[in-house]
Amino acid sequence: MRALKLLTIFFFLSGATLVSAQIAERAIIAHTSESISLAPLLYGIEKGFYRKEGIDLEFRILRTDLASAAMVGSREVDYMYSAGTALRVAARGLPIKVVAYTLKNILFYLMAQPNLKTIPQLRNKKNAVALPLDTGGLAAKATLRTFGLDPEKDVTYIAIGAASTRLAAMGAGSVEGAIMPVPWNIRMKQMSFTELAFAGSYRKEPLTGFSASFEKLEKNPQQVKRVLRGLLRSMRSFRQDQKAAVEFIARRFRLEAPVAEESYRIEALREIESKS
């Protein structure tokens, strides 16, 4: 009888898993560009951790100002993988809340053309950012200020979106400096660009988190909980299975194994798990 009960439970749970996989609820999460800070999130999507929670999670690259507007306006985006920028748009009145933090520090580096070796040499030069007032833009300004430049007067900011576009602008010579996330800074060093500073040393704030609109939290809290469970499972597996995580980073970001290992080490040092 006990064996029969256990078998019944097994088939019930198996059936529930199959049903949840068949009717997985679609959700979209956005971030401004691909960087190492996204690795646990994307790793979990590939490994199916969200689908196991009944969520078909889709990642899109979208500027944070557009993503936040889509969350509360057209509702074409369900979540934003952002902390600092999400807090700032919330402070301006948008009904968005950071539900969880995933990285405790900024992972941006200030990069320059090979002929520039010091930060003061960026005076009167063009500096590429995703947005002047997003986390990367503010980190760049804090770094410039620390080294004696007036970030509002001495540098021209060119808002050109994703890190890949900023790299292309640097390669074309249309900008002299750029604020770049890991692992893009590593790629750029291999291309002989100058790494001027780790911007995370000059501006302290959480880099990434899981953000949702007030409406989403009120009307579909169960989906929020399931996405969070998937994210926590992703982060746990990403931390515990280093070999698989490094292989994923190398494949996803098209990096050589040593660069992928260095990127993993940098990300892992700054990863946190906390929920508000």
Image: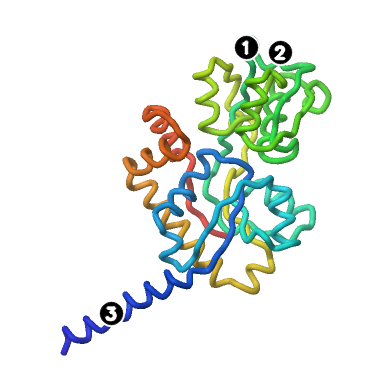
Q: Choose top left, top right, bottom left or bottom right for residue 249.
A: top left
Amino acid at pointer 1: Lys
Q: Which of 173 and 271 lies nearest the eye of the viewer?
A: 173
Disc 1, SS? loop
Amino acid at pointer 3: Phe
At x 16% / y 83%, what residue is drawn?
3
Give the left or right position of residue 274, taking residue 131 as reference: left
* Quadrant containing the C terminus in the rendered view: bottom right
Image mark for residue 11: 3
Disc 2, SS? helix
| Dot in front, 3 or 2 | 3
Give the left or right position of residue 93, taking residue 250 as reference: right
Q: Is residue 272 above or below residue 9?
A: above
At x 65% / y 58%, what residue is drawn?
77
Disc 3, SS? helix
Q: Choose top left, top right, bottom left or bottom right for residue 260.
A: top left
| Dot in front, 3 or 1 | 3
Image mark for residue 121: 2
**3D distance between C-alphas at marks 3 and 1:** 65 Å
* Quadrant containing the N terminus in the rendered view: bottom left
**3D distance between C-alphas at marks 1 and 2:** 7 Å
Image marks 3 and 1: residues in contact by CB distance under 8 Å:
no
At x 70% / y 41%, what residue is drawn?
134
Q: Choose top left, top right, bottom left or bottom right for residue 9.
A: bottom left
Which residue carries the number 1 mark?
A: 117
**3D distance between C-alphas at marks 3 and 2:** 67 Å
At x 70% / y 28%, what residue is drawn?
128
User: What percent of the width, then of the height, locates residue 74?
Assistant: 74, 62
Q: Of marks 3 and 2, which one's residue comes earlier in the chain?
A: 3
Give the left or right position of residue 11, taking residue 179 as reference: left
